Amino acid sequence: MVMLAFSAVANAGGYLTNTNQSVLFLRNPARDAAIGIDGVYSNPAGVIFLDNGFHLSLNIQNAHQTRSVTSTFAPFAFGMNNNKQATKLFKGVADAPVIPSILAAYNTNDWSFQFGFAVVGGGGKCEFEHGLGSFECNVALLPMLLGEKLGVNGYDADSYMRGRQYYFGFTLGAARKLNDNLSVYGGLRMLYGNSNYYGYLRDIKLSTANAGVVKATDYFSGLSVQAFEAVGQCTEAAKQYAAAGLAEKAAEYMAMAEAYGAQAYQMAALGKATENITLNCDQVGWGVAPIIGVDYKAGKLNLAAKYEFKTRMRLKNKAANSESADNIAQLARFKDGGSVPEDSPALLTLGAQYEITPALRVMAGYHHYFDVDTKQYTKNLIGDSNEYLLGAEYDVNKTLQVSAGVQKTNYSQTDAFMNDISFNVNSWSFGLGVGINLKKNMKLNLAYFQTNYTDYNKQNPNYGNLGNLVTTVAGAETANALINAGALKGADTFTRTNRVLGVGLDITF
C-alpha cells in the first residue's frame, strides 16, 4: 500500500522521442528541409543532393535535466523532518554525460545509401534522492488515521527512486534522385530498449505519545500480538460468564473479543504494509518500423517531408524485487517475466528552407506525434503532440558559419496522464552554435541548446488514490467521509529544466 506510486514507473521517459540526434540540430532545430549529413535523420531524402562520396558525422552531446514536483498534502506536516510544512519540493536530477550519434551516407550518382545510430529515446537516468510525494503520502496518512486511536503524531521514512532508460536506434535506408528536383527515401529503423527501475521505501518510523519514536512494522506487529492476546482473554472470560449463567455479560465479552480480533488483523495488515519494500527491475525489448521521405527543390526553396511509422515495443521484465513488492497488486507489471507495452509513436515531419542570399538561409518545420495510437497513452491523452520550429543559418565567411533556431512543443495531456515519476510539460526550446571549416572536407560543430518549461498544476481530491488505503485501514465509509470533507485532497506542480552542450565533426571523403 505504501508503494502505490511505483505503478507509474514504466512510463519514465516513455512520452519522449529524441529529435536531437546531431549537433547541427542543437545549433538550429529547424532542420527538417535542410540539405546536410544530419539529414540521415531529419531529411533523409535530401541527403542525395550532397556531392558524391562518403559523408560522416560524429556527434557527442552532454545533457543535464532536472524534474521538480512541488507537492502539497496536509498530512506532510506530520513528517518529523518537514518542519510542520504541508508543501514539499521533490527534485530529480537526470544526467547524460555522453550521448553519442553517428550519421553516415555514401552518395553515388542518383543513389544515397545511409546509416544512422543514435539514442532516439530516453538517454540517461533520473534520481530522486528523497523519493516522491506519491511515495511519502502513504506513510504521511498514518498519523491522521491513527492519531486519536493510537496516539501517533508523526512519521519518518527513508525513500529513494531512480529510473534509467535508453532507446538505441539503428537506421538503414536509401534515397533515390528521380530528377534534378525530386528525390524519395525508404528505410528501416530498429529500436532496442533497455531500462532499469530501482527504488525503496524503508525504515518507516512513527512518533507516538506513549512509546516515543518506534519502527512502524514492529509497533503494529506488537499491537497485533497484544490484540490477539486480548481476544483469548475476552473469549475465556465469556466462557466463564456463560457457565455461570450470566448470558448478558458473556455476550459483552464476546463482542469485545470480536472487536479485538478485528483490531488484531488490522494491526497485522499495517505491520505487513510498513515493511521495507524494494523494486529492482530491468526491462529489455526491441522493435522495427519503416521510414519514408521525400524532398523537392524549386530554385531557392526546398521542401521536405518524412514519416516514421509506429514502432511496437514490448519490454520484458527481469526483476529481483523484494517479496513484499511481489505481493502488491500495483507492482504486478514489474514482476519477473512480465511484459510492458512501450510503443514509440509514429512521427510526421514537414519542413521548408529558403535561400534569401547565397550566404543566408531561413527554415521552418512542423512535427506531429501520433501519441494516441500508441499502446501506453491511449487512455490518458486528449490528443497528439505537436512541435513548431523556426531557424536561420548564415555563412559569415568561408571558415565560419553561425545558426540559431527555436522550437515550441505542445502536449495534450490530462491530469490522469501526469504523475510525479513520468511527466512532460509544454516548452520553448532554443539552440545556437557555430560551424568551423577546419579543412575543405572537415567541419567542427559547437552548440548550446536549452529548453524552458511551463508549469502544470494538478489538483486531486483523492491524493495518491489514498482512499484505497483508508478503506483497507478504516473502511469505505471512513474513506468516503474523508474525501467528501476534503481531508485527502492534494496538489502537484510539475516543471523541468534542460540544458545540452554538443560537439560534432562532419567529414567528407
Image (spheres, rainbow, N blue to C red):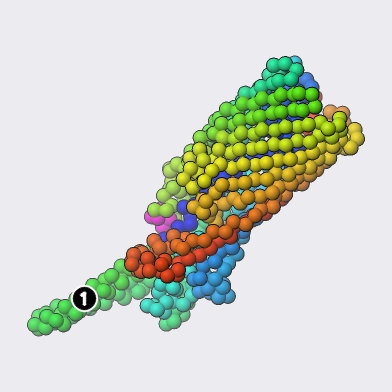
Q: Which residues are magenta?
A: 323-328
Q: For the C terminus, give its image quadrant.
A: top right
Task: For label 1, count other residues whose C-alpha is less than 10 Å away and answer few (under 14), some (14-19) or many (20+).
Answer: some
**Is residue 203 one of those drawn in magenta?**
no
How far across and how far down the image is residue 26, in percent? 74, 42
Camera-side residue of 494 and 334: 494
Camera-side residue of 215 and 340: 340
**Is residue 324 one of those drawn in magenta?**
yes
Residue at 35% x, 74% y is 223
Position of 255 with respect to 487 (left or right) is: left
Position of 466 with respect to 284 (left or right) is: left
Q: Which image quarter: residue 152?
A: bottom left
How far across and how far down the image is residue 314, in percent? 48, 38
Residue 211 visible here = no
Image height check: is 175 above or below 166? Answer: above
Camera-side residue of 253 and 303: 303
Q: Which residue is mark 1?
A: 255
Residue 68 visible here = yes
How far across and how far down the image is residue 407, in percent? 70, 44
Helix, strand or loop at label 1? It is helix
Name the amino acid, label 1: Ala
Position of 232 with respect to 245 (left or right) is: right
